[in-house]
């Protein structure tokens, strides 16, 4: 990686602490990703992105800001990227997946809180995440209690705007979300000084749909018997989708898909056809949280789908592109986003149906339900999801974990026992 120390210093980062973070990543990445055999060539691009994770993209954000542009950070797949793009800003997903940030998060938050929330806050207050440091505005949302209240703490360190996400899906809730989108549009227009016109919003909708289509194409390649790509590689691509330049990401992901489709024709796979096919469902896995995929695939199975926000919830359902008026487009955005089935909603029958549908579509032999510690909504929802899967005759196991490696041995034993049962 080139020398970005001046850039990081100008962003007000703690360089010494940041060095520690940078030292840990190559070893972690090497041990999870580079040990894989028979990886698609197209993954070289994503290797490069990881090697430059705090470099090249940060430089691009800096160039954009120097040219008068703004950067907006988000934490949830409900916040419409389309508006950020239409306002001429760059959006970056900021969910934290590293144990490195937990200690700092715990300085200002209770310890018995979801690691994703603690990592988000820790990343900001430790001054070690250049994405956070590049943001002109953070956008929160009223989803789970942990996030909602943590945004108040985060607001002491950076400007934050919180969208009020309804928790039910009645007609009036769809209307309410539409109003929230209108208000967010005004916030972005004020931040950037750019008007969001119908033309710009329409272009942004098409761009985001193309990104969704590329991810769907990537997922489709996993439906075959001889899977051409590992689950952890797909997880990495999904994680990178949250902060890479969208046009470049679409191009490189479609290129990867060309190669995967060619591999399918030639019968080149990454696992044995007898390897158990696993679908993961549950809480999101933010970069660099590769723990469960690594454990499952090192145990001889292959992950074929993720019903998570770093999976299908991010890209399923496109926004209606046929709308031409601002009212029509905002309604189309509200409709698409309200279709996401997050456990923060009640009731959330749609997720039970999604999990069963996806397990069948991807030919999963079993489902691993991954819950981040102290995530109450997904934890409680396990009961209904388990029931739906059992009724469909699909085995499921519940795993609760955090970002540390303390429980790796115990998890491995449970995963191996589950895989054994699938044989
Ligand atoms: S749409 S899943 S990205 S809220 S894991 S912080 S819920 S305690 S991340 Fe999420 Fe949006 Fe829903 Fe998706 Fe809270 Fe649970 Fe932690 Fe979570």
Image (cartoon, rainbow, N blue to C red):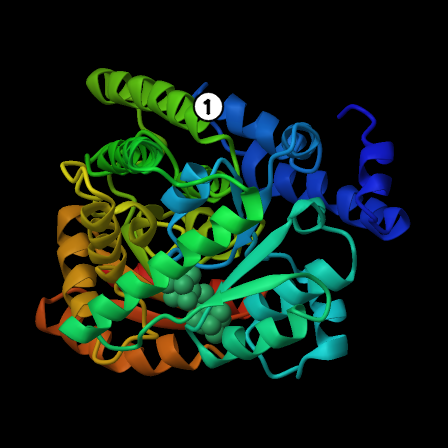
- The x and y percentages for residue 306 are 33, 52
Give the residue at the far right of this rendering.
16
Residue 258, image x and y in percent? 30, 18
Q: Where is residue 44 in the image (x, y as percent from the top left)?
A: 53, 22
Q: Is 20 displayed left or right of 396 in the figure?
A: right
Q: In which quarter of the image is residue 338?
A: bottom left
Q: Can residue 375 be seen in this view?
A: yes
Q: Residue at x 45, y 44 (%)?
A: 84
Question: Circle 1 is placed at which residue position?
Answer: 248
Give the left or right position of residue 123, taking residue 200 as reference. right
Q: In this view, does 318 lie to the left or right of 45?
A: left
Horizontal relation, residue 132 to residue 316: left or right:
right
Q: In the image, is the residue at mark 1 within 8 Å of ligand 1 by its beta carbon? A: no
Label 1 CA crowd tier, 10 Å (few <14, some 14–19, many 20+): few
Above-or-below relation of 97 to 324: below
Of residues 167 and 47, the one nearer the viewer is 167
Q: In which quarter of the image is residue 8?
A: top right
Q: Is residue 173 above or below residue 198?
A: below
Residue 35 place in picture, x, y as percent? 57, 34
Q: Quadrant of ligand 1?
A: bottom left
């Amino acid at each position: 990686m080139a020398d970005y120390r001046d850039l990081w210093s100008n962003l007000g980062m703690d360089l010494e602490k940041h060095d520690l973070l940078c030292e840990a990543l190559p070893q972690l990445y090497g041990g999870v990703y580079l040990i894989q055999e028979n990886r698609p060539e197209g993954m070289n691009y994503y290797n490069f992105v990881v090697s430059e994770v705090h470099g090249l993209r940060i430089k691009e954000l800096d160039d954009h800001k120097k040219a008068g542009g703004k950067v907006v950070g988000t934490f949830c797949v409900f916040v419409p990227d389309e508006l950020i793009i239409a306002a001429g800003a760059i959006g970056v997903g900021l969910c934290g997946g590293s144990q490195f940030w937990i200690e700092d998060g715990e300085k200002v938050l209770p310890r018995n809180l979801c690691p994703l929330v603690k990592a988000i806050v820790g990343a900001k207050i430790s001054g070690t995440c250049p994405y956070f440091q590049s943001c002109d505005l953070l956008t929160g949302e009223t989803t789970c209690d942990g996030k909602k209240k943590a945004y108040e703490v985060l607001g002491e360190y950076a400007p934050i705007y919180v969208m009020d996400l309804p928790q039910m899906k009645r007609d009036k809730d769809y209307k309410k979300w539409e109003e929230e989108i209108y208000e967010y549009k005004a916030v972005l227009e004020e931040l950037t000084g750019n008007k969001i016109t119908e033309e710009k919003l329409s272009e942004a909708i098409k761009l985001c749909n193309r990104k969704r289509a590329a991810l769907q194409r990537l997922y489709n390649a996993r439906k075959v018997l001889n899977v051409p790509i590992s689950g952890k590689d797909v997880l990495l691509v999904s994680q990178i989708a949250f902060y890479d330049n969208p046009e470049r990401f679409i191009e490189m992901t479609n290129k990867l898909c060309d190669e995967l489709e060619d591999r399918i024709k030639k019968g080149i796979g990454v696992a044995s056809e007898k390897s158990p096919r696993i679908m993961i469902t549950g809480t999101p896995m933010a970069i660099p949280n590769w723990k469960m995929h690594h454990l499952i695939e090192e145990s001889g199975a292959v992950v074929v789908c993720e019903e998570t926000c770093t999976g299908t919830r991010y890209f399923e359902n496109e926004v209606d592109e046929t709308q031409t008026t601002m009212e029509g487009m905002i309604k189309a955005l509200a409709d698409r986003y309200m279709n996401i089935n997050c456990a923060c909603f009640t009731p959330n029958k749609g997720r039970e149906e999604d999990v069963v549908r996806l397990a069948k579509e991807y030919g999963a032999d079993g489902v691993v339900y991954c819950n981040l510690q102290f995530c109450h909504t997904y934890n409680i929802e396990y009961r209904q999801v388990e029931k739906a899967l059992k009724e469909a005759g699909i085995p499921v196991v519940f795993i609760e974990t955090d970002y540390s490696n303390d429980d790796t041995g115990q998890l491995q034993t449970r995963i191996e026992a589950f895989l054994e049962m699938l044989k």
